[in-house]
Amino acid sequence: MRSFLITCLLCIASIVNGEELDFDWEFLNSNASIQEKYDHIITMDYHFSQAALNSKNLLDYASYYFRSLDHGKNTQKISLLKSILAKFSEADPVAKTVLGTIYHAESSKIYTEFIKENPNAINDDRLTYLEKYHTLIYSDSAEKGNKLYQEACESHEVRACMWHYFSVLEYLKFCGHINDGNIFNCGPLILKVAGAENKVLSEAIFNYENDDDLSLKPNYAYMIFGIYRHGISPLSENYPEIQKQFGFTRDAKKAELWKKRAEKYIKQHNLEDI
């Protein structure tokens, strides 16, 4: 299973409908009002999310930020986005989610440069690779990003719950690396991964029941179906013995129920399948 952050870091610039998605940096540096600039950021974030849904790969969402910010090297763009989003992040969980992703993009600089110069480091220089990997996921920026994801998740921003899950999964993957691939030496982290996944499940159900945007109901229903059926990542499928031991939620009957709900809603409202 490819690492969430590494997938983003190695992702080639995404192209959607023949057009490359990116922020309008000229506008963001203009004399437009802070509200107008914020609205532009949130509009582009929506397009990034929709493009990820259309590609059927949610990790594409973060890849837009990693690419746009040159994998953390463009400090001017990072500072600009931070300064705008910081004025709205206390009141808007979407702003917190975007800000969290920017902090993660910022944390990727050292690791990205190392991998570009040493593409086979995981085999040729394992100790240095693990040192850079540790910096990637445990840097101050990454920790700030994770904290913002958690806070936004508590405000029912389900995407933030998802990104927090992937962040915790990175901790577990690192623990597995330093234990020769034996994740069973990482029991406390497996519990955290299970807890983060269960939080995504509960927030997806909450959003299905409460989100005013009815067109998103099939998305939430399919997400719930997937978690009940096999989980967010292949972790518990690859290690089935950990499912009950560590509290992952699996229920084939509920999975089928949520799949039928999604399909029924799409048919009733003439929505395009996702």
Image: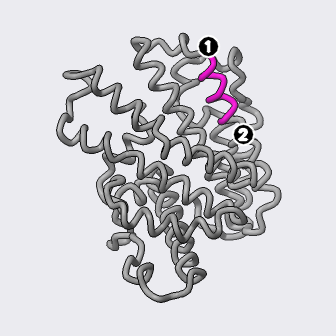
The front one of 119 and 103 is 103
The front one of 244 and 159 is 159
**Please, what secondary structure does the residue beneath circle 1 have?**
loop
Q: Residues within 10 Å of mark 1 (few under 14, many from 20)?
A: few
Q: x, y percentage for residue 218? A: 68, 57
Q: Is residue 127 above or below residue 133?
A: above
Q: x, y percentage for residue 194? A: 66, 28
- The residue that label 2 is drawn on is 199
Q: Seen in the image, is 245 located left or right of residue 115?
A: right
The answer to which of marks 2 and 1 sits earlier in the sequence is 2
Rounded to the nearest whole Å, what is the CA distance between mark 2 and mark 1? Answer: 21 Å
Q: Residues within 10 Å of mark 2 (few under 14, many from 20)?
A: many
Q: Is residue 239 above or below residue 167?
A: above
Whether the magenta-drawn stretch holds residue 192 is answered as: yes
| Image quarter of the C terminus | bottom right
Q: Is residue 110 above or below residue 53?
A: above
Residue at screen point 52% across, 68% down: 83
Span colored in magenta:
187-196
Q: Main secondary structure of the magenta part?
A: helix
Q: x, y percentage for residue 212? A: 77, 68
Q: x, y percentage for residue 214? A: 74, 67
- The residue that label 1 is drawn on is 241
Amino acid, disc 2: Lys
Amino acid, disc 1: Glu
